[in-house]
Amino acid sequence: EIVLTQSPGTLSLSPGERATLSCRASQSVSSSYLAWYQQKPGQAPRLLIYGASSRATGIPDRFSGSGSGTDFTLTISRLEPEDFAVYYCQQYGSSGYTFGQGTKLEIK
Amino acid sequence: EVQLVETGGGLIQPGGSLRLSCAASGFTVSSNYMSWVRQAPGKGLEWVSVIYSGGSTYYADSVKGRFTISRDNSKNTLYLQMNSLRAEDTAVYYCARVVRQGYGDRFTLSYYYYYYMDVWGKGTTVTVSS
C-alpha cells in the first residue's frame, strides 16, 4: 500500500503570500492518479487538482499542482482569505485510494 | 444539477449494523465509479470502499469483511451496509463520484486514465457508542 505523507502539518501564512504544500509518496505514483482536495470546516472536500497538475472546473488559476514520481506539490500563488482550509492529496492504486493526512493552512 | 445526498447515519451500539444510502441526481450511478470516504472527528479523510461501473468492489483493510458497497440502479442510489460496527467506525461518511477519464499522450502514443473524485455529498454522521 502506498502511503502519502504531507508536509508541513500546519502552515501559517498571511493573505497575499505564496503557499507551497508537499505530498510525498512511499513509492512512485503515476501523475495521472494524483489529486488534491480542499476542505473547509463542516464542509465536504472539494476537488482542486487532478492528474497532478490539471485544475478542476471553476478552480482559480492561483492554484497549481506539479510533481512526479514520489514528490508532488500544491502551490497557491497569492493567498486569498477563502483559501485558509485543510488540503489533502490523494492517489489511486490497484488496492484502492489513499489520502495524505492533510496540511492545515491557517492565517498568520 | 449533479448532486449526491447521503442518509442513514445515526447512533448505533458496538456490534450493530447500519445501512447508509447515497441518492444521486443529474447523473447515473451505474455508469460511474462510486466511492465512500469517511472522516473521524478531528481527523483526516479515509477511503472506505469503491464500486466500479462493471460491478467490481474494493474495500479498505479496516472495513473488509464488515462493510458491503452496493447500488440500486432503479433508484440511482449507492449503499454502504455496515455490520459489526466498532467505536473506531465513528465518522462522517461521504459518498463521492469517481471519475475515470481517459486521455491520449501524443508523444508516447499511449492511452492513460485520470482518477479523481469530482462530486461529493455533504455527508452523514455515524456514531458507534454504547
Image: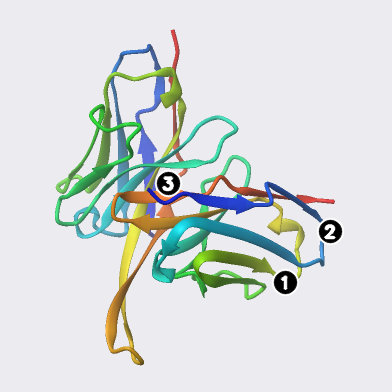
Sequence-first disc among 1 and 2: 2
Of tags 3 and 1, the one toward the viewer is 1
Identity, as a three-letter code, of the amino acid under mark 2: Ser
Share a chain, discs 3 and 1?
A: no
Residue A78 falls left or right of residue A75: right
Name the foreground residue: A24 vs A58: A24
Identity, as a three-letter code, of the amino acid under mark 1: Ser
Identity, as a three-letter code, of the amino acid under mark 3: Gly
Q: Which mark is residue B121?
A: 3
Q: Which mark is residue A14?
A: 2
Residue A83 falls left or right of residue A93: right
Q: Quadrant of the N terminus of chain B?
A: bottom left
Label 1: chain? A
Residue B24 falls left or right of residue A81: left
**Residue at 60%, 52% in the rendered image:** A6
Residue A57 falls left or right of residue B62: right
**Vertical placement of residue A48 versus B82, above or below:** below
Label 3: chain? B
Q: Which mark is residue A77?
A: 1
**Residue at 28%, 35% in the rendered image:** B80
The Cα–Cα distance between marks 1 and 2, rounded to whole angstroms, is 12 Å
